[in-house]
Image (cartoon, rainbow, N blue to C red):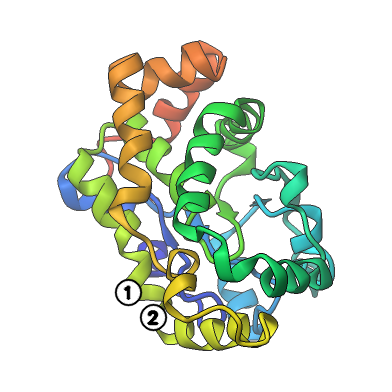
Amino acid sequence: MDKTDLRLESAPNFRDILEPLLREGLPVRTGLLFRSGELSEITDRDMELLREAGIRLICDLRTPGERRGREFRGKDGFSPLLRTIPLYHGSLDMSRLQFMLFLIFKGPKFDFQHFIREQYHDIAFYRTTEIRELFTLISQEENLPAVIHCTAGKDRSGVIAALIQLFLGASRQTVMGDYLATNKFTTPRKEGLARMLRRLSLYRVSREKFDPLLTAHASYLAPVLDEIEHRFHGAEAYLREYCGIEGKTLNNLKRLFLNPVNKTS
């Protein structure tokens, strides 16, 4: 089984985090780290693909409210370690009813674009404890292969994937290209999600206003990458000095993911 080409029908944004680096010519080991949208509706076929890929760890970046009733459940002896590492502030943890009321009463005037940009900044500069926990987990060989996911695999997973890719030597162009690839993978479901959001808002919020929740834009991720470069001159210093990730953890990540052999067996 070629893990690099692993695709899930129930999670279209599921893909290898390091495969873009391989295409750039970097000596990375693919098949060890994946990003995805939520896995709560995984099919039996996709469950078997994860089993065949040897997935040992699933890191869920969603809030408790997002996870409620929409959790991954293994079956038939396939039960990878599940770790929840919420990357949003608790005040944003809404039930479906709370979210609906928010859309109805505040949605028409709410700046969703500003909200998304703030969330990217908050993830990188206020959720350092969670980033440290996540990087520590994926630096342990017994936890690999691993999957990191949020709801759509766009924002929280996108920021985390970018940090990992930059740390392992990817160019800014490669990182941004992989981030924007979300738009290609999520297109089949985007309009359905837009219709659902419109219904929840009782059609008080236009389709256009919801676009930041549905589409990856370079202008969301770029300011975070710019600030990391300006303040720390690279992802490694940011992870070590700002996130407090130990040197041995970062060294383990390089040992596990950087290798002259391009693919895992």
Residue at left offset 61%, top offset 36%: 134
Answer with the quarter of the image where residue 127 lies.
top right
Pointers 1 and 2 in contact (C-beta within 8 Å)? yes
Residues under labels 1 and 2: Cα distance?
Answer: 6 Å
Q: Quadrant of residue 166?
A: top left
- Hey, what amino acid is under mark 2? Thr
At mark 2, the secondary structure is helix
Residue carrying label 2: 187
Q: Which quarter of the rendered picture does the C terminus lie within?
A: bottom left
Nearer to the camera, 187 or 126: 126
Could you classify mark 2 by the number of other residues whose Cα lies within 10 Å: few (under 14), some (14-19), or many (20 or more)?
A: some
Q: Is residue 155 left or right of residue 38?
A: left
Q: Nearer the viewer, residue 60 or 197?
A: 197
Q: Provide the residue designation for mark 1.
A: 184
State left or right for residue 139 relative to residue 170.
Answer: right
Q: Is residue 60 above or below residue 233?
A: below
Work out whether residue 34 can be spotted: yes
